[in-house]
């Protein structure tokens, strides 16, 4: 019994120390993947397919900043149209689980619409804002799969507010380590 009392703390300490280790925070995360945009003007929505790319720098385990690019193509009222956006903003990440990593972000920037996109006569750049988040699932310390990223996108073409929704999924490459 005495040997068990001496050995018990030696067995429990390594387990409790392991439970306290936090998942490593990457210094930079690069995301690329498929994106679907539900574009809307005056309740007349249409679908666009495209791509979404972002580069995020993590300042610590829960806060960072991201630069986001996306481009979408589709058909509206019989016209081939496209739109691109470039935005930047803070990212808030919850890294308490080694496998599942949820995040949220708010990004400000600009969106460009091609001629005939939302009935504009010529290509225009307008203010854009994204608010949303997603869930990454870590495959290993260098790669994660972004299961879903869902964003509300507000634009204002032709002096009319558009409420759009973007859904993305793809791969995240993680570079470096942040303490």
Image (tube, helix red, strand yellow):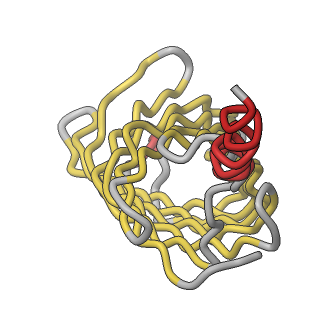
Q: Position of residue 126 (x, y in %)?
A: 67, 59
User: Is residue 106 shown above or below 36?
Assistant: below
Viewer-proximal residue, 140 or 28?
A: 140
Q: Position of residue 75 (x, y in %)?
A: 22, 41
At horizontal 57% and vertical 37% (from top left) the residue drawn is: 151
Q: Quadrant of the N terminus?
A: top right
At horizontal 68% and vertical 76% (from top left) the residue drawn is: 57
At horizontal 70% and vertical 49% (from top left) the residue drawn is: 10
Question: Does residue 105 appear in the picture of this structure?
Answer: no
Viewer-proximal residue, 96 or 42?
A: 96
Q: Residue furthest bottom?
A: 176
Q: Quadrant of residue 111?
A: bottom right
Q: Quadrant of the C terminus?
A: bottom right
Q: Position of residue 109 (x, y in %)?
A: 71, 64
Question: Does residue 59 appear in the picture of this structure?
Answer: yes
Q: Quadrant of residue 172?
A: bottom left
Q: Residue furthest top?
A: 43
User: Is residue 109 shown above or below 177?
Assistant: above
Q: Quadrant of residue 168?
A: top left
Tell me if 36 is positioned left or right of 53 in this view: left
User: Is residue 34 shown above or below 2?
Assistant: below
Numbered-mark total: 0
At horizontal 28% and vertical 36% (from top left) the residue drawn is: 76
Viewer-proximal residue, 24 or 106?
A: 24
User: Is residue 171 shown above or below 15?
Assistant: below
Tell me if 125 is positioned left or right of 78 in this view: right
Viewer-proximal residue, 66 or 12?
A: 12
């Amino acid at each position: 019994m005495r040997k068990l009392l001496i050995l018990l703390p030696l067995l429990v300490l390594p387990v409790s120390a392991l439970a306290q280790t936090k998942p490593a925070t990457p210094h930079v995360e690069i995301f690329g993947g498929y994106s679907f945009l539900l574009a809307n003007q005056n309740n007349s929505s249409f679908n666009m397919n495209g791509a979404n790319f972002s580069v995020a720098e993590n300042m610590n385990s829960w806060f960072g900043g991201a630069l986001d690019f996306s481009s979408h193509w589709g058909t509206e009222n019989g016209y081939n149209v496209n739109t691109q956006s470039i935005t930047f903003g803070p990212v808030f990440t919850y890294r308490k689980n080694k496998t599942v990593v949820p995040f949220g972000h708010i990004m400000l920037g600009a969106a460009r619409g091609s001629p005939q996109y939302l009935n504009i006569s010529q290509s225009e750049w307008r203010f854009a804002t994204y608010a949303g988040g997603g869930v990454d699932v870590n495959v290993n310390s260098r790669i994660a799969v972004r299961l879903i990223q869902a964003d509300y996108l507000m634009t204002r073409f032709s002096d009319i507010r558009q409420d759009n929704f973007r859904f993305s999924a793809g791969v995240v490459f993680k570079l470096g380590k942040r303490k």
